[in-house]
């Protein structure tokens, strides 16, 4: 099942005013903060990259796969999208561990 544009917009609204953007991928979305991928929107759910630095912040979340052979990703449920302080902290923590996405010509954005 693909993710709806409405879901992506709702998640972006929940993350406002952080400089977050989405990039469509195969009917789903990759989610970036400052050009650092911190997760994906899959099947209308925000799934966060599993990193040790955010383990404590995400230990209460259910886990799921972004595709059948992937690692287990913490899933942010709808009610947790409204917990701004926690959501901002976990997104910023995960993004800080990720490399900046490079353009196709090899330059950083």
Image (spheres, rainbow, N blue to C red):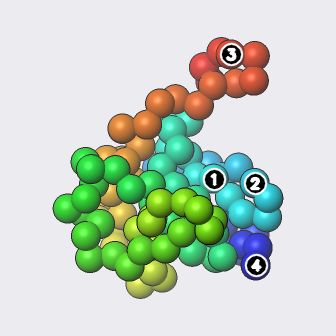
What element does badge 1 sit on? strand
Of pointers 4 and 2, the one earlier in the residue sequence: 4
Residue occupied by mark 2: 25
Q: Nearer the viewer, residue 64 or 68?
A: 68
Q: Badge 1: how crowded within 10 Å, few (<14), some, or many (20+)?
A: some
Task: Name the side, left or right, on which 80 lies relative to 17.
Answer: left
Report the Cα–Cα distance between label 3 and label 4.
Answer: 33 Å
* Residue at the extreme front of the image, as rendered: 69
Q: How many marks?
A: 4
Give the label on residue 30, or none. Answer: 1
Q: CA distance from mark 1 to mark 3?
A: 19 Å
Residue identified by numbered label 3: 106
Label 3 or label 4, whichever comes before in sequence order:
4
Label 2 vs 1, first from the N-terminus? 2
- Of helix, strand and loop, which one carries label 3? loop
The answer to whether mark 4 and mark 2 are in CB contact below 8 A is no
Q: Which mark is residue 1?
A: 4
Marks 2,1: beta carbons within 8 A: yes
User: Badge 3 local density, few (<14 within 10 Å), some, or many (20+)?
Assistant: few
């Amino acid at each position: 099942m693909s993710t709806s544009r409405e879901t992506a917009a709702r998640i972006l609204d929940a993350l406002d005013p952080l400089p977050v953007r989405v990039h469509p991928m195969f009917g789903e979305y990759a989610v970036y903060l400052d050009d650092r991928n911190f997760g994906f929107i899959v099947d209308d759910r925000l799934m966060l990259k599993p990193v040790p630095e955010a383990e404590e912040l995400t230990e209460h979340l259910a886990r799921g796969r972004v595709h059948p052979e992937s690692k287990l990703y913490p899933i942010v449920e709808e009610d947790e999208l409204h917990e701004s302080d926690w959501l901002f902290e976990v997104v910023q923590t995960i993004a800080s561990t990720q490399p900046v996405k490079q353009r196709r010509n090899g330059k950083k954005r």
